[in-house]
Amino acid sequence: MKLRAVVFDVDGTLAETERDGHRVAWNRAFELIGLPDRWDEELYGRLLWVTGGRERLRFYFEVFRPELRADDRLIQKAHDLKNREFLAMLTAGIIQPRPGVRRLVGELLDRGIAVGVATTGSREWVGLLLEAILGPDLARGLGVVVAGEDVTRKKPDPEAYRLALYRLGLQAGEAVAVEDSQNGVEAAAAAGLPCLAVPGFYTLFAREDFGRADLAVDSLGESEQPVRVLYNPHKIAVDGLVTAEVLTCLQQAAVGGRR
Ligand code: XBP
Ligand code: MG
């Protein structure tokens, strides 16, 4: 079965958007609303287990601030302010792509392999983020962008990946997913996609389980920053860089192993 598409997660995978992006934007939103709450790096890292910004804030209020009796109106207001702050950070160029992202997306498109995105993040900022980290030409080349609003159940539910496959017109085994978190790997695996894990700041040293991934590396790699292989159950040859060839081998090994 030929590799026909690669579907990337966004937050933590294409760019380190959480610690210095969404988290900082949330704290600015709390300040603008007049709430004393501030999420430090450690607390935010734990809250990331809940996917979806609104869902994460609701969880935080219920567990840490039940006395606030936060309602949907306050949660929506805070999330809207956070996204406005995050958009301003994108416009200021604060968020940069992780190593190898632009190189690999360009290589895949040059080889006629479709590139898609499946994120639980908000459509409001996803488009601008993709332009900011991929550049307008590569962003225009994306075959599908599934955002949080397109699904009723967020990761680790497989809905986002199933929708991306549907919109690409592909079977699960014809595509590979690229994810940074256990929730994301589990969503891709549940949808039947072979998966490359690229854990990042919040997921590399957390006790996240990447056992359902078909390969795990510390980044996609650049010539001056070679890849470190973390988990390689199919013994795929990775010579310093994650390339279209590596992803094809991953797909063949994963699909082949299912017969
Ligand atoms: C990560 C998420 C998102 C972001 C914030 O998404 O769970 O909620 O943290 O985005 P993924 P919103 O890793 O699937 O890209 O506040 O817009 O949800
Ligand atoms: Mg992610």
Image (cartoon, rainbow, N blue to C red):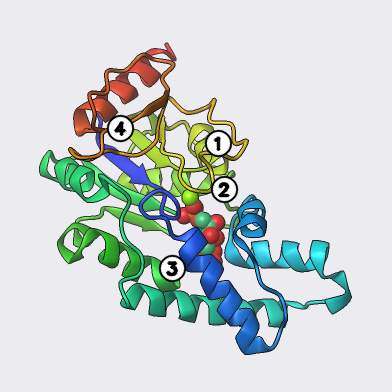
Q: Which residue is mark 1?
A: 186
Q: Which residue is mark 2?
A: 155
Identity, as a three-letter code, of the amino acid under mark 2? Lys
C-alpha separation, residue under disc 4 versus residue under disc 2: 26 Å
Residue located at (25% from left, 55% from top)? 142
Find residue 227 and name its label: 4
Residue 44 visible in the picture: yes
Identity, as a three-letter code, of the amino acid under mark 4? Val
Q: Is mark 2 within 8 Å of ligand 1?
A: yes
C-alpha separation, residue under disc 3 versus residue under disc 4: 31 Å
Judged from the image, the secondary structure of the residue bearing numbered disc 2 is loop
Mark 2 crowdedness (10 Å alpha carbons): few <14, some 14-19, many ≥20? many
From the viewer's perspective, is residue 50 above or below residue 238? below
C-alpha separation, residue under disc 2 versus residue under disc 3: 16 Å
C-alpha separation, residue under disc 3 versus residue under disc 1: 22 Å
Q: Nearer the viewer, mark 4 or mark 1?
A: 4
